[in-house]
Amino acid sequence: MTQGAAATPYTFHMPWSQRLMSIVGIVVLAGATVFMIVIAVLIAAQHWELALSVMAPCAALMAALTGYVGRDLGAKLGLRVAFGGDAVTLDLPGGRSLIHRPTTQHVTIPYSDIAGIETRLEAYESLGMAIMQRAYVLIRKSGESIFLFEDRALGTALESSDFAKVAAELAARAGVTIHDLGMVEGKGGVLAVWGTHAADWSAPSLPLAQQLRLWRHAAVTGTLALAVTILAIVLRVTVFAVSGQ
């Protein structure tokens, strides 16, 4: 352990850029939900079948997505890792993972009680798309494991790697190594939002050929997602420009 680093207090919070992205996402999704509800109400008098079979499910989907992003925002606002001289304080909200279901943790752990940190890549495929993320787990000398956090959208322009630095800092202060468990594939469910399931933490790593295929698939998915986002912004700006004339 580097004594100089351990003696310097340091607290990690999620960058405001990532918090802002979640806030924007909630505003957009909530607006879409309200819009669809209003349309459903307006057309219900004359076309109740359309309102019930199309608009109502769409509004319910947008509302569910709003709650999903809201849960993620709550985690980003509440997550804190405070490095002290002899111990680390972890404030880990329950929503810190999109796939796993970790419990909320508020605990102070002496560096001397940390046996190691494990990490692995996790791929999830759904509806022809794939996402890649990296999860981190802290192992205490008692054998207790604590799910820390995850880096998301790996292999894309939206990739986040803040937690890789936090994990490296924690390992350095504890004088332990980060054990890479390779890559596993979980169940992507629907859009990697509903019906997802992570592989067991003891699952073996995938063969190299399968790993490379999943990396390529995730990269293509990320490119398409970015293109759709840009197209949506362009269309919105165009509609506003036309309506303002």
Image (spheres, rainbow, N blue to C red):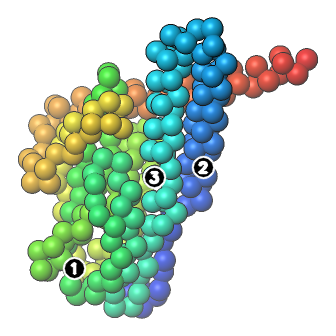
Q: Quadrant of the N terminus?
A: bottom left
Q: Is residue 115 left or right of residue 225?
A: left
The picture places residue 173, in percent across and down from the top left corner, at 32, 81
Identify the residue at horizontal 49%, vertical 17% (top origin): 52
The picture places residue 186, in percent across and down from the top left corner, at 20, 40
Q: Is residue 234 visible?
A: no
Q: Quadrant of the C terminus?
A: top right
Q: In the rendered image of this protein, does residue 208 appear above or below residue 148?
A: above
Q: Is residue 23 left or right of residue 235?
A: left
User: Which is more N-terminal, label 1 or label 3?
Assistant: 3
The picture places residue 243, in percent across and down from the top left corner, at 84, 18
Q: What residue sits right under mark 3 in the picture?
A: 71
Q: In the rendered image of this protein, does residue 219 appear above or below residue 111?
A: above
Using the numbered discs, state the Cα–Cα distance from disc 3 to disc 1 in whole angstroms: 29 Å
Nearer to us in this view, 76 or 203: 76
Element type at mark 3: helix
Q: Quadrant of residue 46?
A: top right
Identify the residue at horizontal 45%, vertical 67% (top origin): 79
Q: Which mark is residue 114?
A: 1
Q: Looking at numbered disc 1 in the image, what kind of residue is underneath it?
A: Ile
